[in-house]
Image (spheres, helix red, strand yellow):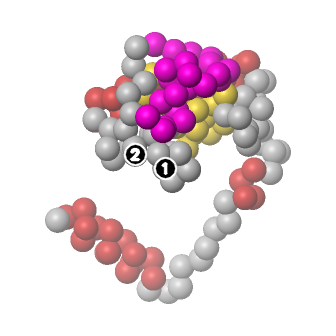
């Protein structure tokens, strides 16, 4: 088994675990965007959120919701952001990142502008796929 998160879940690789039960595990990211940056994973291996059973995805997001105010308080953060990137480590995980309003982190996610008709075209393209 080559998956680094499975090895962490199995205790084969040490991690700073902050919460664990039979379904999920939360531990500190070793390359944190901010101190207290946590990864919440299912104990069982699923490559992406799309591969993960619906009830487990729902469970993990409810667990994230439970952990967020505790992380916020412990890290004296203004809020906790949540993201699923899905291409870095191929074991589904949710990033929970303690944030400050003035931390400047939002700046690393550059935004684009739609040209006149582009927004409607993009919306139509996605709606067409959803409708299939
Ligand atoms: Zn895994």
Q: Is disc 2 placed on a helix, strand or loop?
A: loop
Q: At 37% across and 80% down in the image, what residue appears?
A: 121
- Cα–Cα gap, marks 2 and 1: 6 Å
Left of 97 or right of it: where is 3?
A: left
Q: Quadrant of the C terminus?
A: bottom left
Question: Residue 81, how many percent across, how many down?
Answer: 62, 39
Please tell me in which quadrant of the rendered image residue 125 appears.
bottom left
Is the residue 102 above or below the residue 59 in the image? below
Let me know if residue 70 is in the magenta part: no
> Does residue 61 show up?
no
| For the residues bearing labels 2 and 1, Cβ distance under 8 angstroms | yes
The magenta stretch is 1-21
Q: Position of residue 19 (x, y in %)?
A: 56, 16
Quick one: label 2, few (<14), some, or many (20+) residues within 10 Å? Answer: some
Nearer-the-camera pick, 29 or 8: 8
Q: Earlier in the sequence, mark 2 or mark 1?
A: 2
Residue for badge 1: 86
Picture disc at residue 48:
2
Residue at image coords 78%, 24%? 76
Q: Position of residue 66 (x, y in %)?
A: 52, 20
Determine which quarter of the picture holds residue 49.
Answer: top left
**Secondary structure of residue under mark 1:** loop
Mark 1 neighbour density, 10 Å: few (under 14) some (14–19) many (20 or more): some
Q: Where is the N terminus found, in terms of image quarters?
A: top left
């Amino acid at each position: 088994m080559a998956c680094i998160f499975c090895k962490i879940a199995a205790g084969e690789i040490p991690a700073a675990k902050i919460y664990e039960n039979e379904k999920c595990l939360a531990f500190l990211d070793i390359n944190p965007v901010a101190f207290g940056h946590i990864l919440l994973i299912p104990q069982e291996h699923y490559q992406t959120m799309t591969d993960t059973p619906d009830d487990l995805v729902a469970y993990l997001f409810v667990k994230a919701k439970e952990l967020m105010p505790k992380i916020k308080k412990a890290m004296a953060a203004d809020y906790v952001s949540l993201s699923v990137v899905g291409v870095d480590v191929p074991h589904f995980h949710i990033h929970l990142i303690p944030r400050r309003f003035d931390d400047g982190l939002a700046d690393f996610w550059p935004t684009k502008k739609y040209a006149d008709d582009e927004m409607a075209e993009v919306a139509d393209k996605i709606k067409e796929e959803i409708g299939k």
